[in-house]
Image (cartoon, rainbow, N blue to C red):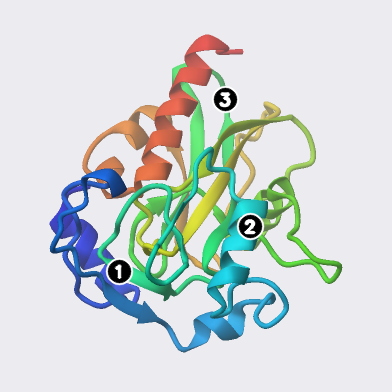
Amino acid sequence: MDRSTFSELRRRIGYPQAAVPAERNWYALDPGYAPVEYTARSAPALAPETGTGGGGGDPQEAWRRAVALSQAPVLFRDPGSGRPLNPAGPTGIRGHGRLRSLGPNPTGDAVAVFGTGQRALVLLVVRRDTGQPAFPGGFSEPLAAGGFEHPLQTALRELWEETGVIVRGGTARLLHRGVAAGSLRNTDNAWIENSAFVFRLPPGPCGPPAARAADDARAVRWTPLAEALAAPGRDLMSETHAANLERLAGVLRADPS
């Protein structure tokens, strides 16, 4: 996705206009870098940890939380504000953005597959907010006892909420986990850390399970893998979803059964 398209899609979800850095590298930061401060009114209110250890404004708490929860091998800290810095590099925007917490925000995605090899069908939704093709997925829910639901549970729940598909058989495997570089919602201080799971649904005489769009999905469709990999749809995907689509193709080439 080019920088102008990224900026436009980010604007659609409520983010302010801000230059997207050419280099996503804290070590190669332009001396004149001046990110726009943005925290949606709803963001701190959504943070279940606000005031109780999750970065609802306290940089020290946000840093401790980031160290405890992040999957990133290395974390950086803003020497001025004390806030954690996005491991994927600068974004042009600082603060919460529209994310619950400073630091990592865990998500789970469901990569549902029907069929075998390169003729497989993959379940994709069209996001209601940006119109992007995407895998069903969303944010992990906080638990009353602390922490978050397991990303696998998140993926299964979001698959059902967005498409009505319930996984009752087949196999599941972790496809990828890590910082969702290039996410529209990321800021310099708050970022998504995603876990994507492949669900290979068992074959049946009636074809793939029926799917219907709901919740955050405007539309849903079982899409041939080759079509999903082609432009222009793939070019509109988030960087993480596009990369996971390529990873899926690799998995199916290696194990077509």
Task: Name the N-terminal-most of marks 3 and 1.
Answer: 1
Indicate the secondary structure of the residue bearing disc 3.
Answer: loop
Type of amino acid under label 3:
Gly
Residue in view at x 46 percent, y 89 percent: 41
The residue singled out by tag 2 in the image is 158
Residue in view at x 38 percent, y 64 percent: 187
Q: Residue furthest front?
A: 79
Q: Which tag is nearer the camera, tag 2 or tag 1?
A: 1
Q: Which tag is nearer the camera, tag 2 or tag 3?
A: 2
Indicate the secondary structure of the residue bearing disc 2.
Answer: helix
The residue singled out by tag 3 in the image is 115
Q: Position of residue 203 (x, y in %)?
A: 67, 26
Q: Quadrant of residue 57?
A: bottom right
Residue in view at x 73 percent, y 60 percent: 148
Type of amino acid under label 1:
Ile
Q: Position of residue 43 (x, y in %)?
A: 51, 80
Q: Nearer the viewer, residue 100 or 26?
A: 26
Circle number at residue 93? 1
Q: Is residue 246 left or right of residue 145?
A: left
Vertical side of 78 occupied by 124: above or below:
above
Categorize mark 1 by other alpha carbons within 10 Å: few (<14), some (14-19), many (20+).
Answer: many
Q: CA distance from mark 3 to mark 1?
A: 42 Å
Vertical side of 229 occupied by 35: above or below:
below
Q: Position of residue 81 (x, y in %)?
A: 41, 72
Q: Quadrant of residue 177?
A: top right
Q: Residue furthest bottom?
A: 41
